[in-house]
């Protein structure tokens, strides 16, 4: 039975390089039989956070928020694809994430990061780890960092060069860890109701 996984991506730039990594992750998870849905912060276009989803009267949230809340609640796990902006988190992805809280609870999240340089977005990935944990997700220990992204993935999201070979070698362990935690969390949620 396949798992429902949301791949979330947050770049608002006109020349989005990280979309290559998002496509790679989506394609590789689907090839393993998983039910994967892409969540593009730019396409959804939420306003800067003024009111969280839960702060709207029931049934009165804007349509985009209502739909996204349903997608998050229906997911078994998440992959956050993040670039690094000045040593930090992408504002578009962070804004999308912050509109929700309880919807994220008791599901695993994995982080894949990228940059144009050799640090592969590692500082953003580190910042995301604490943020996602605080929001009630179990963050898996396996991560993927890609950089320089233009020398690792083609425009279609296919591995190229030595970096691409390294990415292909690291993905199975990353996916195995995520799927292990998804199965564990599903079993626990089925066995025991959340504490609040």
Image (cartoon, rainbow, N blue to C red):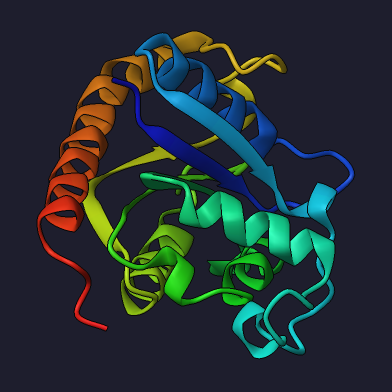
Q: Is residue 48 above or below residue 46?
A: below
The residue positioned farthest toward the front in the image shown: 59
Q: Is residue 159 visible?
A: yes
Decide if residue 12 is in sight here. no
Q: Which x, y percent locates residue 164?
A: 45, 16
Q: Who's the residue at 42% across and 9% down the image?
A: 31
User: Does 53 sit above or below residue 75?
Assistant: below
Which quarter of the rendering shows the N terminus?
Answer: top left
Most foreground residue, 110 or 59:
59
x then y, percent, for residue 33: 38, 13
In the rendered view, tell whether residue 39 sits above or below residue 108.
above
Residue at 79% from the left image edge and 78% from the top image edge: 60
Q: Quadrant of residue 58?
A: bottom right
**Closer to the camera in the image, 133 or 150:** 133
Left or right: 145 as drawn, with respect to 15: left
Q: Residue at x 63, y 75 (%)?
A: 99
Quadrant housing residue 174: top left
The x and y percentages for residue 14 are 89, 44
How many numbered circles are shown?
0
Residue 141 is left or right of residue 132, and the answer is: left
In the rendered image, residue 110, in percent from the top left (x then y), is placed at: 35, 48
**179 sits to left or right of 13:** left
Q: Residue at x 56, y 74 (%)?
A: 100
The C terminus, quarter of image:
bottom left
Q: Quadrant of residue 163?
A: top left
Residue reaching furthest right? 14
Question: Which is more toward the observer, 11 or 86?
Answer: 11
């Amino acid at each position: 039975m396949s798992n429902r996984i949301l791949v979330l991506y947050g770049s608002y730039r006109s020349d989005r390089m990280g979309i290559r990594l998002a496509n790679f992750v989506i394609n590789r998870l689907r090839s393993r039989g998983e039910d994967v849905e892409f969540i593009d912060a730019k396409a959804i276009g939420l306003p800067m956070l003024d009111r969280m989803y839960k702060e709207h009267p029931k049934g009165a949230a804007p349509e985009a928020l209502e739909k996204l809340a349903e997608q998050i609640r229906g997911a078994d796990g998440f992959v956050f694809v993040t670039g690094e902006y000045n040593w930090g988190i992408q504002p578009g992805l962070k804004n999308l994430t912050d509109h929700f809280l309880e919807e994220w609870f008791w599901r695993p999240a994995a982080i894949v990061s990228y940059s144009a340089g050799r640090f592969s977005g590692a500082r953003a990935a580190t910042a995301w780890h604490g943020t996602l944990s605080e929001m009630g997700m179990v963050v898996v220990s396996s991560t993927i960092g890609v950089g320089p992204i233009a020398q690792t993935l083609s425009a279609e999201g296919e591995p190229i060069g030595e970096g691409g070979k390294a990415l292909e070698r690291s993905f199975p362990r990353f996916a195995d860890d995520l799927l292990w935690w998804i199965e564990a969390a599903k079993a626990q949620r089925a066995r025991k109701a959340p504490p609040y």
